[in-house]
Amino acid sequence: MTPILDVRGLVAGYEPGLNIVRGASIHANEAEIVVVLGPNGAGKSSLIKAIAGLVPVSAGQVLLDGQDITATPAHLMVRKGLAFVPQTENIFPLLTVEENLRVAGGVLARSEVSPRIGEMFSMFPDLARQRRLAAGSLSGGQRQMLAVARALIVRPRVLMLDEPSAGLSPKFVEMVFAQLSQIRRAGLTIVLVEQNAKAALAIGDRAYVLVEGREAHEGVARSLWDDPVVAELYLGHRRAS
Amino acid sequence: MNLQFIADGLISGSLIGLGAIGVTLTYSILRFSNFAHGDLMAWGAYAALTVLGAISALLGTVAPIGMLSFGWPLVVAALVAMALVGGMALLLDWVLFARLRAKGQSIIVVMASFGASMALRSLLEFSFTSKPEYFSRAIQMALPVGFGIRVTPDQVAMLLVTLVLVTSMHLFMSRSQTGREMRAYSQNPALARVVGIDVARIVRATWLIGGALACAAGIMVGVLVQIRPLMGLDMLLPMFAAAILGGIGSIPGAVLAGLIIGLSEAAAVQLIGAEWRAGAAFVILMAVLLIRPAGLFGVSER
Amino acid sequence: MIDLLGYAAFFLSTALILGIITLGLNLQWGLTGLFNVGIAGFVAIGAYTSAILTTPEAADRVGGFGWPILAGWVAAMAITGLAAGLTGFATLRLKSDYLAITTFGVAVVVQLVTLNAQGLTGGPFGVAFIPRPFASLAETPVAFNFANLAVVAAVTLVVYLALEHLSRSPWGRVLRALREDERAAISLGKSAKSYRIQAFAIGGAVMGLAGAVQAHFIGFIAPNNYLPTLTFQIWAMLMVGGAGSNRGALLGTIVVWAIWVGAGAFSSALAPTDWQARTAALQIVAIGVMLCVILLVRPNGFFGGRRRK
């Protein structure tokens, strides 16, 4: 089975010569939830940002559905089917909830925008109720919902999220992950970078542990939690630093 | 007390506000204060003058519209000039500003705009000399409208045109996809790319709109007052002050602030003396920076 | 031949006075990274302060204080430094664009005041009979020019050495660090702002001194001497020379001034009389284009080279 997202030996960093991602290779199969774990500074965020075209790539390849998107500029990624939800500042605070969705819907055909927004509102009824509120006045959890809805509106093939549970109360963390499971059941592929390993592994299919910019361990999500090698990589690494 | 200054203030204030829209747009989207904005106004006025001259050469004198001092040739010239100046703004960005933006420090771009402003102004002086020019030599009668205030038909027309332009801008920014994208980009440039917004298109739209509005403001000043190479420089401080008072990024704010500054200048002329007019904008600017730098409708700096 | 030498001395004196202004700008921009668009205004403040304090009584203007020349210069530095300090205080907690816009406003207001406050500044007629050092030599132009050159050169040297010393001092190092790393500035908090205000004020004081020296050199000042063109020339001089280097600032000044004077002479020689005003405008276009080209192609200037970025 060809993976829908195939990352091979990616080397990337904000400044030339200062690479944070050092030859990482991960892949995701269709309708899978792939979790990327790792200690702080391992380069998890930088990896998906590099895939999304936000961090300069100096070597390696990213293939989406067989198509090479390594050099694709960031703003064209959604058109190729790759949507990204950043960790912070992931909504436009002064636009209303509806405007946030509408501005993201720019890549769709005009006639599709309003129906799509309607679909998002039925998926996230809380957002529907607050459609005219400025997005900046939403609570953290609702903002996250909006950020996810905003990414889904373009009907992506692959959805990438950077620590979606960061800063959220347990109730919202549960809600977010439940929502992600549901989305996966609809056939969407999800790549998830997370610090909250337990919750992520609970819904994940496969997982990677990233250490120092490269994947150090890979396996089926559920079993990784009890895997002593993983614990050592995580905790051992932390102890060493 | 003579209330004439209210009319004068509203009229000059609306022109300041119109120019300030371009300034605030450029600042909120491209993140730099464009010192050449006033000179785009001046170039607009001279461009319209030149096109008007060409039309007159071809068609001879055309009767003015109703009680106005100008006829449809000026309207055509204005539209052509707006397109030209919009294009010039794009060219300026492509040749100079975009390259410097890519290199880093935004203040260097401001410096370049300062250099470009001087060069543009002096090119006008070279081409047209500093002698004032006029669209029409016709003298207009000021008509009373009550409260001891008199206005000319031209002034009423310009006020209406400004109203139309400002309303269109507001609708554009709030209802159109490009307007929404521009607002989104000014709030979070990185997220805008993630969401699929084509930044190059946004930048182009900003320059085209800013240039066209500056041109319109310049032509209106030309109709109501006169055309000189320094006309843009004289408007620069009031426009910057209006953009800051209104709150960077807010178009309604820029317009409202323009009106406030126009009224203050007119009041200053009335109460202190015409020669001190330019000081009003500076006083307001300092007051805003010391008391509430975010302005009336602005958001605190990120 | 002797006339040529006399002229050379005059040229160099004018260039060095402009060089002093550029040195002041180098402190504000080269060392501290502050963008001053109102240089002409600060120079004017210094010139008028010294002129008003030292000139004899005049019909409809305040005067007759009879201060000695040097005292006038010191006052010029103090008042201009104060004005610059206030400007910095009002704007330095905000983005750098606001400082640029405010300094622009200062220059506009200074122009306004010098033109209209006739009781203080003599209005459009300016201030005349400003006492000149070596006034007794005025009869022999060559000696006069050389004596003036000596004074100007001495002042330039003192300012240069003082600024070099400041730049290498711990104070200067802090400023450099603030310029390079904005985040360091934020972590320093309040002190960062006060360092920058100090730098801006001192730079302003230097500009005021130059204005005063020039006023006493020529003997007469008017609002027309302090137009945006001057601000613009100084910026071109600093960027050509190399921002961050005092030596570059002086060399850049002499080069740009030579180009300016040369271009002026060239166009007056070639252009018919009724086109004189127009060709003068071309000089400015040329310098404007040059400034933009330098920013694009060689932002570190030609004579500096101390800053690697």
Image (cartoon, helix red, strand yellow):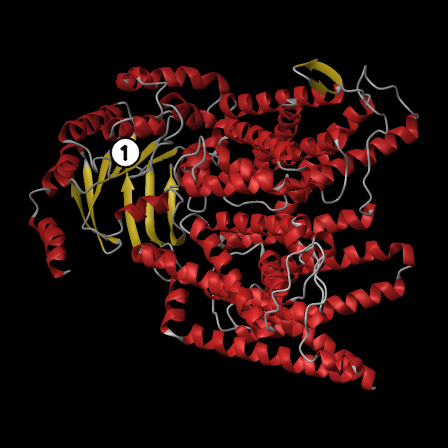
- How many neighbours does mark 1 have within 10 angstroms: few (below 14), some (14-19), or many (20 or more)? many
Q: Nearer the viewer, residue A237 or A62?
A: A237
C240 or B238: nearer the viewer: B238
Q: Quadrant of the N terminus of chain A?
A: top left
Q: Which picture quadrant has residue A183?
A: top left
Q: How many marks?
A: 1
Q: Which residue is mark 1?
A: A190
Position of residue A24 measured from the top left corner of the image (x, y, whole percent): 29, 51
Left/right placement of residue A130 relative to residue C201 reads left
Which chain does the numbered disc 1 sit on?
A: A
Which amino acid does the dot numbered 1 rest on?
Ile
In this view, A100 is above or below A61: above
**Can residue A152 be seen by looking at this rendering?**
no
The residue drawn where x is 66% and y is 77% is C133
Residue lying at 85% horizontally and 64% vertically, measured from the top left: C268
Q: x, y (%) of residue A103?
A: 44, 27
With B182 as the anchor, is C239 left or right in this view? right
Horizontal and vertical percent position of residue C204: 52, 62
Q: Foreground: B242 or A93?
A: B242
Assign a secondary structure to mark 1. Answer: strand
Q: Quadrant of the C terminus of chain A?
A: bottom left
Foreground of the two, A20 or C127? C127
Q: Position of residue C188 (x, y in %)?
A: 31, 58
Seen in the picture, residue A140 relative to B236 is either above or below; the reply is: above
The residue under the point 53% across, 36% down is B243
Residue A136 in sight here? yes
